[in-house]
Image (tube, grey):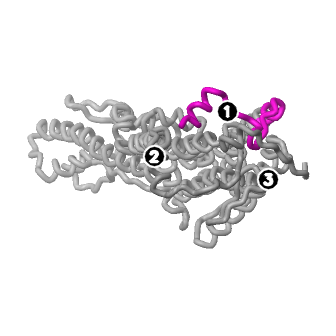
Amino acid sequence: MGTHESHKVSDSDADTGRGAHEAPEVEQPTGRTIAGVLGSPRFWLAPLVLVAVLFSLMAALYMSAVVDPQRHLHDFPVALVNEDSGGEVTGADGKATEQNIGNEVANGIISSAADSGIVVRRTDRSTAIGELNSGKVYGVVVIGSNFTNRAVALGRSTVLPAQPTRPAIDIFINRGSGAFASSITSTFAEQLTERVNAEVGAQLTAQVRDQLDRNDVTFTGAAQLALADPVAVSVSEPTPLPQGAGNGLSAFYLTLLLVLAGFTGAMMVSIVVDGMLGQTPIEYGPFYQLRERLAISRWATLAAKWTIMFLVAVVLSTLFIVVGAWVGTSLPNAFVLWVISILGIFAVGVSASAMMAVFGNAGLLFNLLFFVVFGLPSSGGTLPLEASPRIFEWIAAIEPMHVIYLGVRSVLYFDADLSAGLARSVVQCLIGLCIGVLLGLLGTKYYDRKGWHRYPGGMTLPPKLDKIVNAG
């Protein structure tokens, strides 16, 4: 290392021009050259098909992920707390029996929500609020204490002068789980309000009508109107996001920055390093230079790129936090965010560099597909995975953008709670980093051991591939 290699070009290569870099003796006229090149379908058909397939795939993935969230809604988690202890309800026969109207309402909520893809699970208040504040559920429904007694008192108030208190249901949301997730929960709250009022109102109306009929008392229209909307349902946010959180979108955009920094950063580092080592040309506008190749192995080249990528990860993570603070972004737990940002950028950069080192130019396409094409619709940053087709949940299990988003969201909105996704993010980023290291190490070491070097003539194409690429 540190010295330069010179390689002789064989007579056959000099005749065919393969592996040589001398200028042609006479430049062909532009029109004739273009006509000759485009006259072969092999030249233009491959890029046309590649671009068409790639962007058709992107259109299919992106549009299918967002086109109909309500239809694709599945396993959307909501917690339910029933604090009603029940009470005595007078039946049609005039006898009082113990009844828990809150429990009846809860059963109705669970069964009706299941039909729309929402999974409502019973729990206690402290557990439910804790899960809401760690992103484990998207909403909490609390049926208030004395729900039954207040419902009964409301019915009696139609014939008594006392002013009643309406039975209450509180619904809590957290925009830190995602702006669209909160929107789905709010829509669920509107549907719940209509359904619960219809059911409880019909029950109270029937009970009051029976009692009034027995006492030969007129059931006035005002009383019927009051019982048609008996339950007070309110939606609130117990832990509102701070100013500068972008309504729950700042975590997604920062995640996008981190993934792009790792993916495009690896590509830029690879271009610059390969040019400086004489393995690919350096071009600045019309200026073209192919430096004499430095005697360095594939593995050493990749190790150099990884070292630079670590420095890139540290610098960019620092700049992202500085710029975010400058524009007014809410950045709690800045040090933890800085560390997870470095890990995310470095893990993506190492894996992307390894893909390019092992697969060559095809590695660029693999990186684009893995980190961006499949990453964006399965990130869960704008639309919750529970509102997308199930295939995106399977993709998200291995996609770095989703796991990085979970970590960033935990730091920004959930006080860096490990159970809110931060622990999973760190573990999966480390696993991805190790996989990238193993892929790059084993691949480049194998190529070096086989003597497949990166210089003209150092590694020739197999006959069949050579025939496809160089035909005509």
Q: Which residue is mark 1?
A: 461
Disc 2 vs disc 3: which is toward the camera? 2
Q: Of label 3 and label 1, which has the lower sequence position?
A: 3
Q: Of label 2 and label 1, which has the lower sequence position?
A: 2
Q: Quadrant of residue 276?
A: bottom right
Disc 2 vs disc 1: which is toward the camera? 2
Q: Which residue is mark 2?
A: 38
Q: Residues within 10 Å of mark 1 (few under 14, many from 20)?
A: few
The amino acid type of the residue labelled 1 equals Leu
In x, y percent, where is residue 218? 9, 46
Residue at image coords 11%, 51%:
221
Q: Residues within 10 Å of mark 2 (few under 14, many from 20)?
A: few
Q: Quadrant of residue 369?
A: top right
Disc 2 to disc 3, C-alpha distance: 33 Å
Q: Quadrant of residue 355?
A: top right
The amino acid type of the residue labelled 2 equals Leu
> Which SS class for mark 1?
loop
Disc 3 to disc 1, C-alpha distance: 22 Å
Q: Residues within 10 Å of mark 3 (few under 14, many from 20)?
A: some
> Which SS class for mark 3?
loop
> Which SS class for mark 2?
helix
Does the magenta segment cover residue 435?
Answer: no
Residue 326 or residue 373, whichever sits in front: 373
Q: Which residue is mark 3?
A: 277
Residue 158 or residue 471, whichever sits in front: 471
Magenta residue span: 444-472
In x, y percent, where is residue 440? 75, 38
